[in-house]
Image: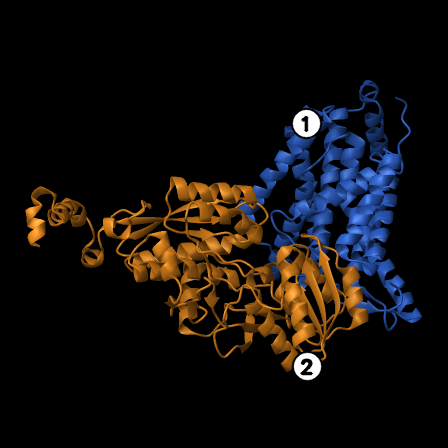
Chain colours: A blue, B orange
Amino acid sequence: MFGDYSIGDLGAIFAMQGFAGLILFSVYVLMALGLAIIFGQMGVINMAHGEFMILGAYVTWMTSNAFQAYLPSLFPGYFFVAMILAFIAAGALGMLVEWGLIRHLYKRPLDTLLATWGLSLILQQAYRSIFGAREVGVELPQWMLGSKQITDTIEVPINGIFVMCLTFLITAAVAYVMYKSRWGRQVRAVVQNRVMAGAVGINTEKVDRYTFGLGCGIAGIAGSAFTMIGSTGPTSGQLYIVDTFLVVVFGGAASLFGTIASAFSISQAQSTMEFFMSGSMAKVLTLLAIVAILMMRPQGLFALKVRK
Amino acid sequence: MADDKDQGLHSPFRRKLLMGMAAIPAMTMLPRTSFAQAPATSVVNTTGLAVTDTEVTVGILHSVTGTMAISETGSVQAEKLAIEQINAAGGVLGRKIKYIQEDGASDWPNFAEKAKKLLVNDKCAAVMGCWTSASRKAVLPVFEQYNGMLYYPTFYEGLEQSKNVIYTGQEATQQIIAGLDWVNKTKNAKSFYLLGSDYIWPRTSNKIARKHIENHLKGCKVVGEEYFPLGHTQFNSVINKIKLTKPDVIYAIIVGGSNVAFYKQLKAAGIDLSKQTLLTISVTEDEIDGIGGENIAGAFACMKYFQSLDNPNNKEFVAAFKKMWGEKTVIGDVTQAAYLGPWLWKLTVEKAGSFDIDKVAAASPGVEFKGAPEGYVRVHENHHLWSKTRVGKAKLDGQYELVYETADLVEPDPFPKGYQ
């Protein structure tokens, strides 16, 4: 297994695979963060999470086209505008969905699963009707392409670094909002005891709506970022949903820190194994390990301590 | 004749005469042009297909929903275009083609059910359809049991032949062997890295490719072979491996949306396709639409048709396609193969002088279509097409530039000896 490579090669392999693992980690965190907020904090199983991501991707595509047509001189910076628009669009749709659908289903998690699954089908068909069945290509500004040479054998892709920075910023922002801000305290209060939270004057309905909106908005940003590495089509969202749930459940649903830890362990395991065996095999082994660990720890890696 | 008269009322001559008279009211309703050439329905349809004096019904069976809709949309468009053109030119044996479209919904059992509906309820004289091998395998027993005729447009892994199917795309050897020979000769390629999605078509194709590289090309070897689940979007690891093994050729058979991720990450990882040779048999102009020309420019594709082919047939076809479906549409290899279906069927029916499935199947070998956008094709006895193999180089604008084509039509060989 290692025999074919020299020591120098192996060093480079581990460095490059480690970095590939870090990019994968960032991707997983971006995918799972929005879901972790909605699933962990609100107990809603959102099967339409992937479709909110794709909405972000489509918004990015439209912004890119708009900049090319009307503001070609500002094209290199369009991506930042696109991400903000993606957040707003996905967040707004999320709040609308919460108001029209989800709020009638609180305390019935299995029903939210069905309802949001239906929603995901509706959204897919809507994308197909609006944008067409074919995949669309999002053009990136020149500075985001290519890679940075670090040593002779080690090169890191620039968009990978970009995704990593973005993930760090968003995670930090979410952590701040959830654990330091007044609103975050309200969210956690509502999660722990809805009736009591209402009794002390928290507007639980409003908290729910904004929480759901925030989760969907982050999905929108994730989708926007994924246009750099993945495809954008009506059904592309389906590609992400399984991995996303895996990360969230494995990490322990209610814990943001658990989400990050689980994303890290899954991505590093996957990336290292992928190098020495086939892609499918690495995935199988990762899944088996996750199942085994979940059997021993059904709450996931980091369970929230709640009095039952 | 003397015997006929003796039989009086029951003479066949009298019966024919009466039947002819009965057809007169119907025939007066026919347009003038077809009046002269349209033979009576009782002659051209002896097995109860949906053929009337003015109309013949065919089926279109593709996925317009589900994950395959992205690919199959082009096929549906091409088939509808061909049907419209055939109708404008007077139809088939003087009958206009009417189509019934069913949605396979990317679900194989559903394909089988809809195929049965098209054959049993609608009595379609032919069906154009399917894309994935899985859907074809699902409908095959239905077509054989109820004796239908399927025109299947996708390039595929071979190892199949049926009286009830005409394969208008390439089978594996037509695409792979000529392409590998070309890259070996012109690029002096010795080492190959094989990549693919993890299901039957890429695995079988790569098996043939590996056999050809190891047994038929001198001094060549495979330095890696790898498969990824459908929809996989993380290729960093394999790209690292490619960087370390430095193969002369990356041979990529990844399908669908995964391609977008693969080519974007390849470019981001600093692999320059103008220096690193990459040969694919699964990326058509359709996929480039999603990948983006700038990410794949310089790659080579081996198939039988490119939108940019410079011949009068193709120019006409591209113009007609864009007129019907919009200026922005692109046409890939399978779209063209789907376009061949209705035309080949029309030519075969007219050669057979009948719509009957058995007669059409028997008449198929030798049918040639001179108006094919790809130039010229001919049906082989094994129900596949003789066609040219071509290599194109991807350009920034998402089109392929033709760099090589075989001098002659390549004989289809769905069961290649020594490659299984």
* Foreground label between 1 and 2: 2
- Tag 1 and tag 2 share a subunit: no
Residue with the mark numbered 2:
B188
Q: Is residue A118 above or below residue B285?
A: above
| Residue for badge 1 | A111
**Could you say which quadrant of the image residue A92 lies in?**
top right
Asked whether the beta carbons under mark 1 and mark 2 sit within 8 Å of each other, the answer is no
Q: Nearer the viewer, residue B358 or B171?
A: B358
Q: In the shown orientation, is residue B248 left or right of residue B114?
A: right
Task: Say few, some or many: other residues with alpha carbon within 10 Å of mark 1 (under 14 / 14 to 19 / 20 or more).
Answer: some
Is any part of residue B402 visible from this angle? yes
Circle 2: is it few (<14), some (14-19), or many (20+) Cα within 10 Å?
A: few
Going by the image, does A132 lie left or right of B252? left
Which residue appears at 90% of the width and 66% of the height? A10
Is B419 or B196 nearer to us in this picture? B419
Q: Position of residue B104 (x, y in %)?
A: 51, 45
Residue B222: percent from the left, percent from the top? 73, 70
Q: Chain of mark 2?
A: B
Relative vertical location of residue A288 with respect to residue B278 in this rendering, above or below = above
In the rendered image, the quadrant that contains the C terminus of chain A is top right
